[in-house]
Amino acid sequence: MKLLVTGGAGFIGSAVVRRAIAEGHQVVNLDALTYAACLENLAEVDDNPNYTFLEADIRDRAAVDRALADYTPDAVMHLAAESHVDRSIDEPGAFIDTNVTGTFVLLEAARAYWQGKGRPNWFRFHHISTDEVYGSLGPDGQFTEDTPYDPRSPYSASKAASDHLVRAWAETYGLPVVLTNCSNNYGPYQFPEKLVPVTILNALAEKPLPIYGDGSNVRDWLYVEDHAEALLLVVQKGQVGRSYNVGGENECTNLQLVQKLCGVLDRLCPRETPYNELITFVSDRPGHDARYSIDPTRIREELGWRPSVNIDEGLMKTVQWYMDNETWWRALQNRKGVGKRLGTPV
Ligand code: NAD
């Protein structure tokens, strides 16, 4: 396929681009290169004739129109977003601009492109979203594709709004869309502001390992390369108009996750005393959702997808990757907000 991927210089987008190129697809990566972007994530595909990078903002209608006209993609895979909940608490405006207005501009450009081509049913607009749109679960139950939306942070509200826009464009204009809502990702190339890289890098620097609140918040962790595989399956084989929940079936509390990471570090990079000793509880994030859990039955039964690694294998690969790629993460540590506590109560 010829794919136009937005946000391909980010954490998940770059995993999608690398995998798509490895599978033989042609990819145009349209990315505005915000603080979260890193073109080094794409070093292994940079010289590939099937890969093109285009620096552009999804809110720039003329630039998106040009990209669609020049590259004539079979599908748009839309990952560009502001993605960090803590930053959304401090500066929600950027989340509305990119996640809501940006998605609107992209949808309108995609609609004009698709209509101009005679409304082909081979075209796909694939919107990549999060399980956070469903809100927070109690101790039991799982999110299915029919769970009502109940977003509770500026980030999840902006993603929920974008999901609604995508569904509205499908209902109203017939745009052939697919959607995915995925749980927390971790793995190589994750920007050093999210829990897994912060824990690994603080541990390697022998700094405190901060845990919000009492660490009891539960997340369903998925290795990023498994997510990328799921996304490429959905864009090619997903049923038009349908959404698919993608999850790792690896629930654990934030405290358990950090303890697992400490265990891996104890094995791969031993110090005199266990890394667990560095765990420090800090004030909680305002509105911190208690539990997310994905029921991935639909994507498993319809498309045959399941994660290739469990959390223990995935964390082992991830810690090893950060240990082997110090040049990559050192370069990002000077970027705005990195290493600072963001999203604290006002
Ligand atoms: P990221 O923050 O690592 O990357 C986002 C990318 O989008 C960056 O390269 C950035 O430069 C680009 N971008 C931002 N604003 C842009 C704009 N206006 N125009 C063009 N490009 C822009 O994000 P990520 O963690 O890779 O997440 C990618 C997508 O997956 C997001 O839509 C996010 O909501 C969703 N998602 C993330 C997770 C997760 O655990 N990280 C889980 C589920 C879903």
Image (cartoon, rainbow, N blue to C red):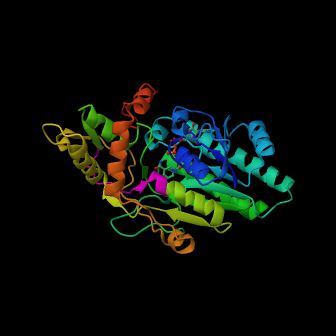
Residue at 73% from the left image edge and 62% from the top image edge: 176
Q: Position of residue 144 (x, y in %)?
A: 49, 69
- On the rendered image, what quadrant is the N terminus found in? bottom right
User: Which picture quadrant has residue 322?
Assistant: top left
Is residue 289 toward the left or the right of residue 172 in the image? left
In the rendered image of this protein, does residue 310 appear above or below residue 71? below
In the rendered image of this protein, does residue 248 appear above or below residue 285? below
Q: Position of residue 46 (x, y in %)?
A: 60, 37
Is residue 341 toward the left or the right of residue 177 in the image? left
Determine if the magenta segment contains residue 183: no
Q: Position of residue 212 (x, y in %)?
A: 30, 44
Figure quadrant, ligand 1: top right
Of the pair 27 and 337, the residue shown nearer to us: 27
Q: Position of residue 312 (x, y in %)?
A: 31, 56
Q: How many marks?
A: 0
Instruction: State the residue lying farthest toward the bottom.
Output: 301
Q: Give, as a single range, the part of the protein colored magenta.
A: 212-226
**Does any portion of residue 218 appear in the rendered image?**
no
Residue at 44% from the left image edge and 62% from the top image edge: 307
In the rendered image of this protein, does residue 249 appear above or below residue 261? below
- On the rendered image, what quadrant is the C terminus found in? top left
**Does any portion of residue 8 appear in the rendered image?**
yes
Is residue 145 toward the left or the right of residue 208 in the image? right
Residue at 56% from the left image edge and 39% from the top image edge: 9
User: Which picture quadrant has residue 95?
Assistant: top right
Of the pair 137 and 255, the residue shown nearer to us: 255
